[in-house]
Structure formats: structure tokens, C-alpha cells
Image: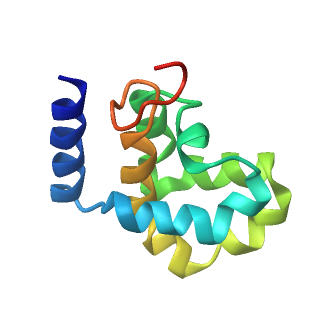
Amino acid sequence: MRAILGVLLALNLYANGGDYQRGERLFYTQLADTIGLNGADFAYRLTIAEWEKLFENDGEGFIRALGDEYPALKRAIAKQSFIKALPDLKAFLILYAKDGGGGFVGGY
């Protein structure tokens, strides 16, 4: 059942403009080394609602929070190419959120 929900969530996210696979690539190529976590573990820190809140207003909250927590990323996440890819990163993070159902992390 969780697998079906995960697939439906992924399809919904893709239909709404975000490609979770591109978001995963973005995470691993631009963020993972500095953050020190794999993508699923990073995403699992918050719920879908919490990720949604951070990505409101074109991702301003996410960019601010990430820059505050990881100052070494401030320059990279301010680039227009990164900002343009935020819907993909959002799709990836929501898929693997605590309540996202996309992965079996956090004790499953």
C-alpha cells in the first residue's frame, strides 16, 4: 500500500512541475557533500507540510534556512540555475519526507 501511495505521490509531483529524479541529481551534485547526509535522510528530517512551507514564495524560506544552516552553500544556492531547479528539489524532498512514503528510511 505504501508503495502505491509513493508512486501516486511521485506522479502528482511530476504533474505539478517537479521531477524528483532531477531533484535527486541536484541534491547529490550540489548539496550532499556539504550537508553530509544522503538525500533520503535529509528529506526525512521534515514532513510534507514542513517542506511545502519552506518552498513557498519561490523557495525563499528553503534558500534562507539552507544558507543559515550551511553557510558554505550560500553562493551556490543563490545562483539562478539552482533557483530554477527548486521545483525538482522540492519534488525529491517531499517524496522522501517523513510522511512522503517514497522511501523506507527512518526505521521502516
Residue 22, relative to residue 41: is it above or below? below
Which color scheme did the rendering employ for the protein? rainbow
Q: Nearer the viewer, residue 77 or 106?
A: 106
Q: How many marks?
A: 0
Report which quarter residue 95 is drawn in: top left
Residue 9, relative to residue 64: is it above or below? above
Extreme right residue here? 72
At 41% from the left and 39% from the top, the residue drawn is 52
Report whether 72 appears left or right of 103: right
At 44% from the left and 74% from the top, the residue drawn is 84
Q: Position of residue 86 (x, y in %)?
A: 45, 63
Image quarter of the C terminus: top left
At 76% from the left and 65% from the top, the residue drawn is 74
Q: Position of residue 32 (x, y in %)?
A: 68, 59
Q: Nearer the viewer, residue 55 or 3?
A: 3
Q: Position of residue 14 (x, y in %)?
A: 21, 57
Image quarter of the N terminus: top left
At 52% from the left and 68% from the top, the residue drawn is 26
Residue 105, relative to residue 96: is it above or below? above
Report whether 15 appears left or right of 100: left
Q: Nearer the viewer, residue 107 or 64?
A: 107
Q: Position of residue 64 (x, y in %)?
A: 67, 51
